[in-house]
Amino acid sequence: MEHKAKSIRPFIGAANFELSRSFYRDLGFNESILTHNMSYFGTEAYGFYLQDAYIKDWIDNTMVFLEVNDVDRFWSELVLLDLTSKYDHVKLTPIRTNDWGKECFVHDPSGILWHFGEFFSK
């Protein structure tokens, strides 16, 4: 089967929809409101749907990986946002180097784990 995909857009939930909307705007995503309980957040050609839906097991097991060009620059800009002071439960984990590349981590206000990574060139 040949895929001629244009994007992939996961659906993620939120314990507090309004708080999560604010968090993702602060993180630099552009919001398009779709309905009273769902928004699309995008950056360039990539994005995700945020829903006003919370199922603890689902949220606790949701991880999203976003590849960035320069994880060191991304981390520096991320720290300047001071998200941990603005939002309860938000956690930042500094850059880790792996055999495939580097990544840093952000837990959103609901607990969703974001990986922001950069792959080493081969």
Image (tube, helix red, strand yellow):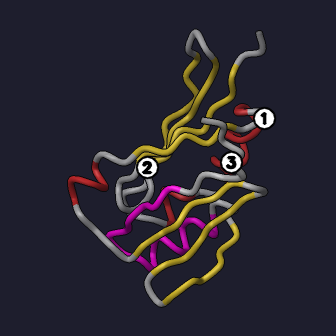
- Which of marks 3 and 1 precedes in the sequence? 3
Within 10 Å of the Cα at label 3, are there few (<14), some (14-19), or many (20+) other Cα atoms?
few
Residue underneath mark 3: 5
Query: What residue is at 53 percent from the left and 38 percent from the top?
Result: 115
Left or right, residue 36 beside residue 16: right
Q: Secondary structure at mark 3?
A: loop
Left or right, residue 48 beside residue 87: right
Amino acid on which the number 2 mark rests in the picture: His
Q: CA distance from mark 1 to mark 3?
A: 21 Å
Which image quadrant is residue 83 in?
Answer: bottom right
Q: Horizontal and vertical percent for residue 2?
A: 66, 37
- Which of marks 1 and 2 precedes in the sequence? 1
Q: Is residue 77 above or below residue 41?
A: above
Q: Horizontal and vertical percent for residue 48?
A: 56, 61
Q: Secondary structure at mark 2?
A: strand
**Picture disc at residue 14:** none
Q: Is residue 121 above or below residue 110?
A: above
Q: Secondary structure at mark 1?
A: loop
Within 10 Å of the Cα at label 2, are there few (<14), some (14-19), or many (20+) other Cα atoms?
some
Left or right, residue 113 beside residue 67: left
Which image quadrant is residue 120 in?
Answer: top right
Q: Is 18 within the magenta?
A: yes
Residue underneath mark 1: 69
**Picture disc at residue 107:** 2
Q: What range is drawn magenta here?
A: 10-26
Confirm or deny contact between disc 2 and disc 3 (CB under 8 A): no
Query: What residue is at 37 percent from the left and 48 percent from the top?
Result: 62
Confirm or deny contact between disc 1 and disc 3 (CB under 8 A): no
Query: What residue is at 60 percent from the left and 39 percent from the top?
Result: 116
- Which of marks 3 and 2 precedes in the sequence? 3
